[in-house]
Image (tube, coloured by chain):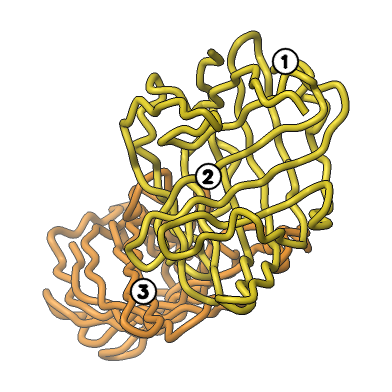
Amino acid sequence: MKNKAFLLALSLSTACNFTGVFVPDPIDPRLPMYTETGNDVAGAFVNKIVWKSIATSETGFISPGYDFGFPSIYFYDSGDRIKLKLTGKLSGVETDLIFDILTSNISSPEDFARLNDSKIILDGVNNKGYLRSSRYQLNSSSGVGQIYFKKINVSGQRISIAGTFGFLVSDPIHGNLDVSYGRFDYGECEVY
Amino acid sequence: MLGGFSKNMIKQQNLVGSVKGTPGIHLGAAMNFKPLRKSSKFSLEKQSALITRGYTQTIGSFKHEASLAYITSTLLAKYSFRFLSIQNGFSYEVLADASGPQFEAKYSEFDISWISGINLFENRRAGIYFHYFLGLKPVYNYYMFDKLGNFIEEIHDVKNRSLLFGIKVRITEIYDEK
């Protein structure tokens, strides 16, 4: 697959500032409440430890692997894959949650709207969820579970996205990592 | 004029950890009038007050505190004895403030409570009262989903319970001469 991305910086451009509005979840206030209001936050449990998005005003960077220092979503120009990255911290260590998803004919923000209200099974082969940090070098370990794009709004060059996720990574070194009760809400940022 | 303190409690289904109500305060005004000319013991009381409520939620070493402020509009039916009166009625409560950002995302804008209470020494210039507020309406709205992110249902949870006690001071009396 051609690994050159058509770039869509989802709400996640510097124009958004990523300051984040943390509304505590009513059930467990350690996590952000699930919202669809563009709060620029995400949260989950990883083996019952809280993983939370971090507020950032980073401009981000593009590495050869098209990586960013801020939450992002990007399309491969072949149109058959998207990658969603949520940046955060787990026990004080910067840890990203990444979803690599096989899609069909998604090569622009407008196309992305087709995923609205869709659940994507993470089978560990075509669709993967994984953690990446200095603690967990799990790029190659494929999480099995689900990501749910519950609400996607695309308006011109602006996009907002909210959803939930959960997956299990089985790693020979770290054992099972159970990522559960995940939620994210990023919104209304300009598309590059 | 009336004012005092309150002991707050909540009734809830799903909140994790240890959940305890926090003390609150209230301040307001009341107007008492007698609609039945033949019964001097029966009266109606219209109250309006600012009351605070809240709770703490403790999960291990993590502690979360929620503070709410309501403006209440209350109508009570009162029956008086010599130095004591009993009251029952309803209160309509508008959420005026809440701790944290975007509280409208999870709190209802209003609450409705059934009130039962007693007043002592109301025939004097200053008396004391105890009012129990029984919240009838869930004030939290949130989604519940399973660990994979499948939405189960939208939950309406958390009902307020408050015991208010304080001092009521009579400012003036207006009599109908007819």
Closer-to-camera residue (B110/B101):
B101
**Chain at numbered mark 1:** A
Q: Tell me if residue B13 can be seen.
A: no
**Looking at the picture, which amino acid does disc 3 mark?**
Tyr
Picture residue at 51% right of the left edge, 15% below the top: A190
Quadrant occupied by the N terminus of chain A: top right
SS assignment at label 2:
strand
Chain of the residue that carries numbered disc 3 in the rendered image: B
Task: Give the residue drawn at x 58%, y 60%.
Answer: A138
Q: Amino acid at mark 2?
A: Leu
Callout 1 crowding tier (Cα within 10 Å): few <14, some 14–19, many ≥20? some
Instruction: Tell me what residue is drawn at x 51 percent, y 56 percent.
Output: A43
Q: Secondary structure at mark 1?
A: loop
Residue bearing the label numbered 3? B55
Is B52 or A6 nearer to us in this picture? A6
Q: Amino acid at mark 1?
A: Ser
Q: Position of residue B127 (x, y in %)?
A: 18, 80
Quarter occupied by residue B25? bottom left
The answer to whether residue A99 shows anywhere in this view is yes
Mark identifier at residue A190: none
Give the number of marks.
Answer: 3
Colour displayed for chain A in the image of the structure: yellow
Circle 2 chain: A
Q: Nearer the viewer, residue A39 or A44?
A: A44
| CA distance separating discs 2 and 3 | 32 Å
Task: Read off the residue under disc 2.
Answer: A86
Residue position for label 1: A108
- Could you tell whether B70 is left or right of B175 in the image? right
Q: Given contact means CB atoms under 8 Å apart, are the residues at marks 2 and 1 in contact?
A: no
Residue A40: x percent and y percent? 47, 38
Pointer 2 local density, CA inside 10 Å: few below 14, some 14–19, many at least 20: many
Query: Which color has been applied to chain B in this rendered view?
Result: orange
